[in-house]
Amino acid sequence: MLLLLSSVVAFGQDWTEAQVARALAPFDYVLLLDRGVSAQRWSHALKASDAFLPCSTFKLPHALIALDTGVITLRENRKRCNAQECHSSHGELDLAEAIRVSCVSYFRQTARAIGPERMAAGLAKLGYPATGTLEPLDGFWLTGGMRITAEQQLRWIRRFYTEALPVKAEHLEAVRAASLRTGAGDWAIQGKTGATGQELGWFVCQASREGSARWMVILLKGKGATGTEAERRLRALLSGEIR
């Protein structure tokens, strides 16, 4: 169970309530940290049980389903981005590149190929905890009825990085590898951003160093909130920039 932080987190450096507030201002926020044997939460004007669109954090389970159903394979997974259904023109790219640049068109294409029945079955197989409809099929994670809470995100991202999910091991390792980010200080980071417009930003991740790992979820809400901004704010905390 997540426990409310009363004062300080021993996480290589001490994060006080004031430090977190400075790092995440002026946004409304939820920040959850799972240490494996204990967990903490910080929040302002939001709750960890509030449900929102998963946005592009959904690309991690989505990629596993695409591989598991054979819609793409580890050898044949290149697609051309259709800029008209994406936030940018990415050209031709493979699965790892599509995850790293968060190509919406790539995953719209795989969703259409997977279809609603196999998508629903894949989500159930993975134990992905979001609720809601899978409509529209090629965008339900961005504009449709799917919803997920920060608490659910935290539980699933820990499972994604630590458990043998019911898919081929090489598929799981490939998607994990594609989620590698630039490190923060001496922390290695794997994770995925997600955003809707400029009002909501997620970053879900695993941070590790010296053989130990932590799992974190940050959600920002307000003008200018994006997944990139959420990641940047969390990096500032991890690297000790916020005093």
Image: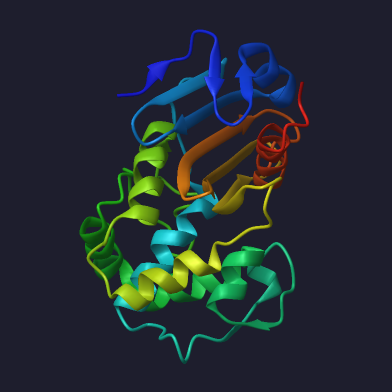
Name the spot of residue 48 as percent of width and height, x first: 44, 25
Foreground of the two, 238 or 195: 238
Looking at the rendering, which quadrant does residue 222 occupy?
top right
Q: With 206 as the anchor, is 146 left or right in this view? A: left
x 37%, y 69%: residue: 172
90 or 213: nearer the viewer: 213
Question: Is residue 211 something one can see in this rendering?
Answer: yes
Q: How was this image coloured?
A: rainbow
Quadrant of the image for the C terminus? Answer: top right
Q: Is residue 107 above or below residue 146?
A: below
State the residue lying farthest toward the top.
6
The residue sitting at 52% across, 48% down in the picture is 208
Q: Is residue 207 left or right of residue 123?
A: right
Closer to us: 92 or 146: 92
Quadrant of residue 67 within the rendered picture: bottom left
Q: Is residue 48 visible?
A: no
Query: Would residue 120 be found to the left or right of residue 19 on screen?
Result: left
Q: Position of residue 115 (x, y in %)?
A: 33, 72
- From what the image shows, is residue 91 above or below residue 221? below
How far from the left and from the top, in percent, is residue 103? 62, 67
Q: Give x and y (percent) for residue 75.
A: 46, 91
